Image (tube, helix red, strand yellow):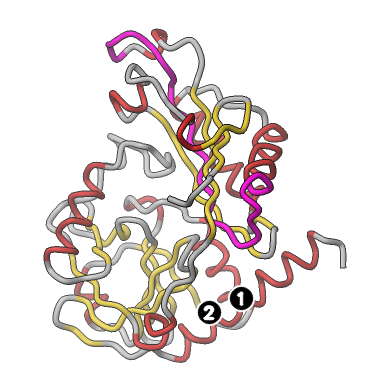
């Protein structure tokens, strides 16, 4: 948290100490809400429309009313400007809102809308050059027919359990399996690996969030002659891979040096895709500014 920070709360910018949400908010009481995490480069939010499309999809699936897209874009812009940010981490959160105790959404008259924007602190370069350690968590991913993975939900408890396990075991991130033992995703990431010159990643149907960065990476790989397979994979498939990395909005493409006791090198496919990703970000910014 930064000094003199400004938050967008509901309809206006307020100082962080005044950005107070009711203890009766159903987001606080029950984790009833949705969110999106975004990253701004040089004042431009990368893939903003895609993130807001997904926020809208999450809202539809949870039957949650959210502000119009134009309002959200303005709120993001205002929050970045209020905090004098160029390279930023942005989080948009919408909860069911304040209501009496009870699970019925009808108890909440209007949603709570929050935008947080902070200066983006770059990840240490050695993580990208050397890679990070992952473990396979005992905690399983939510069942697809219980909580749809297309919903980017505030209800994150099983991911938190998996993250705690990773920390206890000295790992950077944890891989979560679904109920059938298939690789689903990381606690906050999508998993990729290279096997027999094919870039493999779990399909959304097995319980993986359809990540924005995941989509960008898949498209870049296909455009540049890398065969891509979205499917069902077990840990043994990962253990026999030549390269492993994970993706998310903030870290982009993070190489993996170890999963459990299996070691990997930061390979050419990983390096090439990360370079292409950075070029895609630059092209997006240039196109956004009309240059």
Residue 14 vertical placement versus 50 (above, below): above
| Residue displayed at 22% across by 45% down | 158
Q: Is residue 287 left or right of residue 5?
A: right
* Percent of width and height locating residue 11: 62, 25
Residue 189 % position (x, y): 38, 60
The answer to whether 136 appears left or right of 12 in the picture is left
Q: Is residue 107 above or below residue 242?
A: above
The percent position of residue 113, horizontal first and vertical second, equals: 53, 29
Number of other residues with Cα within 10 Å of mark 1, as a class: few under 14, some 14 to 19, many 20 or more: few
What is the CA distance from the residue labelled 1 to the residue labelled 2? 6 Å
Q: Quadrant of the C terminus?
A: bottom right
Q: Which residue is mark 1?
A: 278
Magenta span contains residue 99: yes
> CB under 8 Å between callouts 1 and 2?
yes
Q: Residue furthest front?
A: 4
Judging depth in this view, the residue of 111 and 17 nearest the camera is 17
Numbered label attached to residue 274: 2
Quarter where residue 287 is shown: bottom right
Dot 1 falls on a residue whose secondary structure is helix
**Is residue 237 or residue 273 the one in the foreground?**
273
Q: Residues within 10 Å of mark 2 (few under 14, many from 20)?
A: many
Q: Nearer the viewer, residue 175 or 229?
A: 175
Image: magenta residue range: 80-103
Give the x, y percent position of residue 58.
Answer: 48, 35
On whether residue 47 falls in the magenta region, the answer is no
Residue at 63% across / 43% down in the picture? 79
| Residue 290 visible in rendering | yes
Number of the label disc, if any, that sits on residue 289: none
Residue 179 visible in image: no
Helix, strand or loop status at disc 2: helix
Q: Residue at x 43, y 12 (%)?
A: 108
Residue 186 picture quarter: bottom left
């Amino acid at each position: 948290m930064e000094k003199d920070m400004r938050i967008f709360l509901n309809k206006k910018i307020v100082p962080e100490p005044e950005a107070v949400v009711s203890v009766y908010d159903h987001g606080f009481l029950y984790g009833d809400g949705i969110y999106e995490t975004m990253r701004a480069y040089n004042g431009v939010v990368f893939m903003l429309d895609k993130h807001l499309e997904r926020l809208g999809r999450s809202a539809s699936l949870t039957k949650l009313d959210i502000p119009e897209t134009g309002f959200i874009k303005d709120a993001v812009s205002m929050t970045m400007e209020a905090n004098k940010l160029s390279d930023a981490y942005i989080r948009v959160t919408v909860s069911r809102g304040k209501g009496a105790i009870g699970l019925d959404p009808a108890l909440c008259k209007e949603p709570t809308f929050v935008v947080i924007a902070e200066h983006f602190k770059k990840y240490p370069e050695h993580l990208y050059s050397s890679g990070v350690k992952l473990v396979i968590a005992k905690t399983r991913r939510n069942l697809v027919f219980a909580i749809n993975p297309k919903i980017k939900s505030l209800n994150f408890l099983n991911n938190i359990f998996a993250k705690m396990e990773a920390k206890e075991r000295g790992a950077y991130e944890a891989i979560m399996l679904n109920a059938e033992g298939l690789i689903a995703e990381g606690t906050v990431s999508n998993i990729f690996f290279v096997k027999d010159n094919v870039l493999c990643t779990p399909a959304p149907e097995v319980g993986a969030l359809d990540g924005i960065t995941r989509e960008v990476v898949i498209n870049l790989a296909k455009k540049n002659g890398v065969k891509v397979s979205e499917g069902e994979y077990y840990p043994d498939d990962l253990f026999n891979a030549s390269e492993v990395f994970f993706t998310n909005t903030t870290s982009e493409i993070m190489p993996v040096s170890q999963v459990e006791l299996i070691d990997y090198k930061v390979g050419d496919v990983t390096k090439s895709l990360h370079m292409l990703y950075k070029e895609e970000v630059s092209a997006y910014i240039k196109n956004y500014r009309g240059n």
